[in-house]
Image: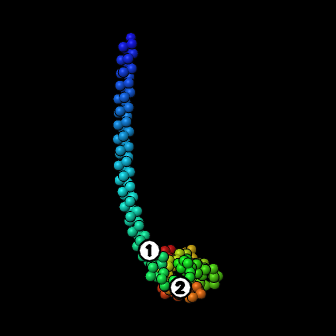
Amino acid sequence: MKKNIILYLFVFTALILVFQLVNSKKVFDDLQGKWSETKVRNEKLKDSVFRLQERIDEQNDFELEGNDYALRYFENLGIQNIASHVKDHLYDTNLLREKNDLIPYAAMDRTFLINKVKVLNHQWVVADFSDGTHWGEIFLTYQINKNGAIKFELKEHFLYPNPD
């Protein structure tokens, strides 16, 4: 009887070990597959990040913050962030209740307001404007005098055709 109990325990233990071995193998294979999928996905994401970084670098080629030559032009003014200073002055033109001289179009539905501004270098600015129905862009030059006052001059402009 004692022999049978030991035999049953041995067989039962062997079955548990075989079950554990098969189950562990399945779990290991599943984790290995997930790991390889994750590795492939990470490589794709790295490539995407690299392409996006290249696009950002290309965009920054035409931006004041990335242009050391243009920033040297403003060294003697003592203004910390030139691009923000220029943008603030342009956005301040939105506060004028009368016609904005920088936008050469008469108000159609409402007054035209400057929405987005990109400072390209030490002299050029591109801005987007809209009245909620009509959109356009302007190309400006600017000069900053020693007091920090900014003078804008409109060079080019266009209004997108209304799709209606």
- Determine the secondary structure under disc 2: helix
In the image, residue 33 lies at what x, y percent? 35, 45
In the visual, does 20 lie left or right of 139?
Answer: left
At horizontal 48% and vertical 76% (from top left) the residue drawn is 65
At horizontal 58% and vertical 78% (from top left) the residue drawn is 88
Query: How much space separates mark 2 and mark 1, taking CA atoms?
Result: 24 Å
- Determine the secondary structure under disc 1: helix
Label 2 crowd (10 A; few <14 / some 14-19 / many >=20): few
Task: State if disc 1 and disc 2 touch (CB < 8 Å).
Answer: no
First reached walking from the N terminus: tag 2 or tag 1: 1
Query: Is residue 95 depicted above or below 145 in this figure?
Result: above
Front residue of this view, candidates 60 and 130: 60
Q: Residue furthest right?
A: 97
Question: Residue type at mark 2?
Answer: Asn
Which residue in the structure is indicated by mark 2? 76
Q: Nearer the viewer, mark 2 or mark 1?
A: 2
At horizontal 41% and vertical 67% (from top left) the residue drawn is 53
Which residue in the structure is indicated by mark 1? 60
In the image, residue 100 lies at what x, y percent? 59, 84
